Amino acid sequence: MLSLKQIHPAPGRDVSAADAYARPDGVARHVCVNMVSSVDGAATIEGRVGALTGPADQELLGILRSLSDVLLVGAATVRAEGYGPVVTMPELAERRRTAGQEPAPRLAMLTRALDLDLASRAFTAAVARPVLITTERAAPERLAAARAVADVVIAGEESVDLRTALDVLADRGLPRILSEGGPRVLAQLFSDDLVDELCLAISPVVVSGAGQRIMSGPALPQPVPMRLAAAFEEDGFLFTRYLRSPRE
């Protein structure tokens, strides 16, 4: 299991990543977003995240997924990254059982028109039935096909209402929500003041160019205050945990 060298708040300690990133218990809903960027702020290289990641980052990704109830991802990210089934790391299976969680996290996809490959491994090989969160604009024939392979939630008319979507997930016993974006989804989550925690990994590369940032959307009406709760180093990566500052 991944061990990280802690930088903040107690420098020099080696800590278990699973313990350091443990999800909170007894909350009605907790939304964590996990993203990676280059040192100079790029969220992708040639449109993909993969070139930014490394072994430690990938293992931490697996840990965060394994500790969560549901993984929330936009349809564009599912298509670009070729998402498959979400699985639990074997080392964390007992922790999930003890916490009363399902054997594996659910995969929840945000899609206005259900324009996803319903025959992909994200559906056919899923350990737990996926959730498709869509809108009233989805075509009836696509709705019928989607309901054959996933639980379908209608949340919004023209675009997905994220607050409604998150409330539905929490009401279904999935309060520990992890999102991996993409950048548009993350921007909307922050715009709607729905993010409790940001886990940002800084990859030890410089990209330059005009690549995507971790958020892509209109400027927020005002900056969202975050506080650094913890920082770790491993494999040249800087792993940070920011928590939403108390709302005034």
Image (cartoon, grey):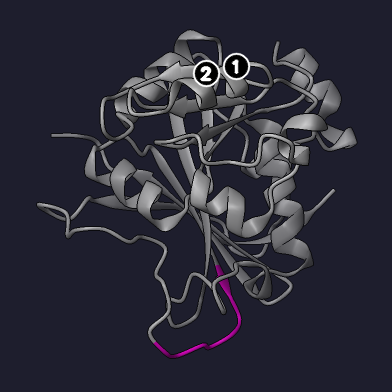
Residue at numbered disc 1? 147
Left or right of 122 in this view: 223 = left
Res. 104 in view: yes
The one nearer the camera, 244 or 164, is: 164
**Mark 1: secondary structure:** helix
Q: Is residue 80 above or below residue 27?
A: below
Lateral position of residue 166 relative to residue 46, left or right = left
Label disc, if present, on residue 94 of the rendered structure: none
Q: Is residue 27 visible?
A: no
Which residue carries the number 2 mark?
Answer: 152
Q: Position of residue 162 (x, y in %)?
A: 33, 31
Which of disc 1 and disc 2 is earlier in sequence?
A: 1
The magenta segment = 202-209
Residue placed furthest toward the left: 221
Q: Quadrant of the C terminus?
A: top left
Q: From the top left corner, tell me how far across and down residue 241 is, in percent.
A: 49, 52
**Alpha carbon of mark 2 to alpha carbon of mark 1: how far?**
6 Å
Between 230 and 75, the one nearer to me in the picture: 75
Residue at 43%, 36% (x, y): give it.
Answer: 113
Category of crowding for the residue at label 2, using alpha-carbon neighbours closer than 10 angstroms: few (below 14), some (14–19), many (at least 20): many
Say which residue appears at 85% left-offset and 22% top-offset: 94
Residue at figure coordinates x 88%, y 35% from the top left? 91
Q: Main secondary structure of the magenta part?
A: loop
Residue type pointed to by label 2: Val
Question: Does the magenta-highlighted stretch encompass residue 149?
Answer: no
Q: Give the percent coordinates (x, y) of residue 21.
A: 61, 42
Image side of residue 246 versus residue 120, left or right: left
Label 1 near label 2: C-beta < 8 Å?
A: yes
Q: Position of residue 69 (x, y in %)?
A: 62, 24
Residue type, numbered disc 1: Arg
Where residue 66 sits, quadrant-wise, is top right
